[in-house]
Image: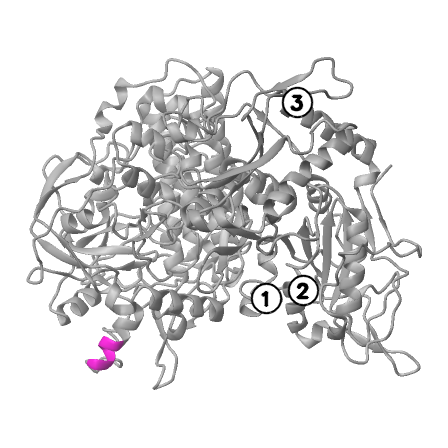
Amino acid sequence: MAPTATTPTPAPAQPATATAKPLVSKAAQPAGAASVGSALEAPLIELYSAQQANSPEASQQRLRQAIIDGLKGGDNFIIPGDVNSSADRQWAYRRSKAIKMAKTKAAMAYKEKWGDAQVGKHNGGVNAEEGLDGDSAVGPASLIELGAGSLRKTIHLIRALQGLPDAAKVTNENKAGTKQSSASPAVNYYALDLDRSELVRTLGELHDQERGASDTKDKHHFTIYDGAVALNGIWATYDQGLEYVGQGGLAPKQGQKEGQRCFLWLGSSCGNLDRRELADFLHASSEKALRPGDSLLISIDRRNKPEDVAAAYHDANGTTEKFILEGLVHANRVLGKDVFQNGAWRYHDRYNELEGRHESYYQSTKAQTLNVPGEAEAIHIEEGELILVEVSYKHSELEIHDVLDQAGLRVVQRWSTDGDKKYDMWLVERPAFHFPSSHLNTGSRVDQLAGLTAQQAFGARGSWEFDSTGGAGANALKAPHRHARTGLPSIDEWQTMWKAWDTVTLTMIPPKMLFEKPIDLRHICLFYIGHIPAFVDIMVCKVTGEKHIDSHFSCIFERGIDPHMDDESKCNPHSEVPQNDEDWPALDAILAYREKVMERIYGIYGDVATGARSLDRALARTIWMVYEHIALHMETLLYMLMQSPNTLPPAGFTAPDWPSLARQWDAADAAVGGEAARTALLHFKAAPVIIGHDDDDRQDAKFAISKPSKKVEDLNAQLHASFGWDNESPARVMQTGAFAAEAAPISNGQYLKYLQDHKLVGDADAVPSSWIGAGSSSDPFRVRTVYGPVGMSVAHLWPLCASGKQLADYAASKGGRLPTHAELRCFLDASSGPNVTDRPGSNVGYTNWHPVPPQLARQESGIVIPGHNGGVWEWTSSPHVEYEGYKSSLYYTGYSSDFLDGKHDIVLGASWATTPSIAGRRTVINWYQQPYPFIFGGARVVYDDKTEVKASRSRSPPRA
């Protein structure tokens, strides 16, 4: 039987239970609302009953078997935590109880925490109306709640939809002059749940209490707020509902395209999944039901104080204990007999601080035998034996960023409860592309076994649940996938890179911009679209000896330009390009050429996997080089596009809600101490610093694979691949003197005050290119973004993007200077400092398409969480010159050798537009001419004369 969307015929109302209560008091109904009976149900999409395997009887049987299997348990005890901890060993268990808890209307207050004013109503219902008003070509947006339950959490969000623009609330008048709501609402709300009767009851009550004067309850108009929101139910499991939505089940039947989808997961059920399971579920859900730009609003419990968690789950009134023990009554109904005797079990729980989870158990009060109907063998339970009932995970900010990164989701915004900050709501989306962090996957326990401290391991790399002990503990998980950082990239990584490149070149550059030069010192935009595939083909053919796919394209697209700023007649060697627009190849021809180039690359991978082609380190290095070259040029193209008013926002990403973000940023800055904290000095002793790594491409001929494989991890291991550009090698030691550095980079607000104090507002040489005039004496500048210019009220805390000269002048005005190469490397290596790294939560890898305020290092759950600089490269005062041991690349001779001229200064770190593979590699050295104003680069002020000698700061552990 196929799933059907039904509008049921009138049926007798469900009998109300003694504890059933309305969402809000009846007095809250809109004045003058028509009296509408409850004979009709909300339209239901019935998926659960459509399959025999999902019938209530089949589900009951599966639940019964799961309970029996859990009671039989395993042969070995599981230690929930550290196998060497005597405290954890006391909680060892080998039985668990898969149980579907009976719903209780007397749930304790903390189980309804998302229905209060602190979060549910925060910021006008978490911008529930943002982006949901639709347009004439797009149908209504869909708001789908997973596990809707009582709707007490959701009501605040739904009420916020009253703030939709009036134009979206279409009404008509009938012949009698009475307003009738439109049949096409702005938003369709879908409550998904397994309990059909609860769906009918709660949606009916929601309609009765929230309907407007023009809303009726019939099979065509089950709406509230005068037609703005239509109410619907989906009777289904999560998987059924996600698959149905993903296959277009909610698409309008006629004409319009389906509107935006936003899923809600507001309950606490995500806490029942460990962090790896949660990441896997979110990833699978995203792949199944979200399109690029679709979103998910999810509520998360933080890792709060152990005593607070313990009190919530083991309250003085015994409410939690009764709730858990009620599960035994339900289990007896499922098993068909009183298998669990009243009084033979007690509730036993603890908060496992190490794992960040609450654990609930049944503990046997005596030795007993369980006789399950239909089972030949009895189950013998010892006195004091534990049966695990459920776990509820709590997440630190670091951990939830790790989870979301593994799931391939991008954080749009987060809201926290006021004051205590115990709970968070995360608005995340499936982006058009996602670069996973290559820094996540080492695992803190593995690092500690290698001799690092807990603080070094936890603060610098992955969170607890993303590692593998290999022991018998509850966390003996399969080692997570490690993303290639410095070796041959995988096919998946290639495909992600092309998605990113296409987003920038095909969605942000309109046709009229193809022949535009956003920066006079560079080529037209079309050149870069052709340069990328041409460079790939040229470099690979140089190693393989094969012919170029298109020699003409190789000629005109081989290399871009970088003129000397003090004499533009002097320039690096570059391609001779067409001088007239009509002489350039057509965009379609370039894209077709790109496809042929990539077929060649993918063919190499396929031949290596089958053994038809050998792979040596020279070819692997070249493929890595052309891959990373795309990432570097994508950032170059973006800072060019930032200078043009014709640039479009990136498709497949949610535009920022600037006013809301600005409020959050200002509040967060004030909470940590404001400018005093940002300009606080971090002191460093004189110390040696290791720069670079050992990677001699002249040794590549010695390494070739001996065993074919389609796994790049295997190939990189055989090749001992640890690639970098020529100016990253060899490893060498540089010495710093004692110095002090400001905790955060120079901000837009600080620089604006500097211009005003020094009467430089009208000096074109002093005004950064990242700003644009606003035409107001009180607010003279706005800051450029890919979404258009934003006011200083939004961007004043962002790190300033400016030329090295402008930043050096600012530093000098404070009696300071820019750091040297060695000093900045020393600063960035400090494990407790505001690192620019590739770990989730840092503003790199297109986490945002703009800078954000820097985040200072802080403590959370006793662990130092590294900060970040807001998403900019950082200038140094050190010139980019040849050094002892430098050798130019065998394969790309001019990469850095053409620029070792003393006219370029070194920049380190990464920006918001830098991929994680570059951001996480501490050996990377970038360079620009000091007056060059366009890069996503900032700086921090350092001092000599304010330095106090203090203990050395801890260094980051070596990267795995």
**Helix, strand or loop for disc 1:** helix
Is any part of residue 552 visible from this angle?
no
What is the spatial separation of the Cα atoms under label 1 and label 3, in whole angstroms? 43 Å
The residue where tag 2 is placed is 158
Query: 380 or 459, which is in the foreground?
Result: 380
* Dot label at residue 69: 3
Question: Upstream in the sequence, badge 1 or badge 3?
Answer: 3
Question: Upstream in the sequence, badge 2 or badge 1?
Answer: 1
> Residue 548 at x, y = what percent?
42, 33
Splitting the image into 4 quarters, where does residue 480 fall? top left
Query: How packed is label 1: few (under 14 Cα within 10 Å), some, or many (20 or more)?
Result: many
Q: Quadrant of the N terminus?
A: top right
Residues at discs 2 and 1 in contact (Cβ within 8 Å) = yes
Splitting the image into 4 quarters, where does residue 690 fall? top left
> Residue 472 at x, y = what percent?
45, 21
Mark 3 vs mark 2, foreground winner is 3
* Dot label at residue 125: 1
What is the spatial separation of the Cα atoms under label 2 and label 1, in whole angstroms? 8 Å
**Helix, strand or loop for disc 2:** helix
Which span of residues is magenta-colored?
753-757
> Residue 763 at x, y = what percent?
24, 78
- Under mark 2, the amino acid is Ile
- Under mark 3, the amino acid is Asp
Q: Main secondary structure of the magenta part?
A: helix
- In the depicted structure, whether residue 863 falls above or below residue 451: below
On screen, residue 226 versus residue 219, left or right, reads left
- In the depicted structure, whether residue 431 falls above or below residue 377: below
Question: Upstream in the sequence, badge 3 or badge 2?
Answer: 3
Residue 369 lies in the magenta-colored region: no
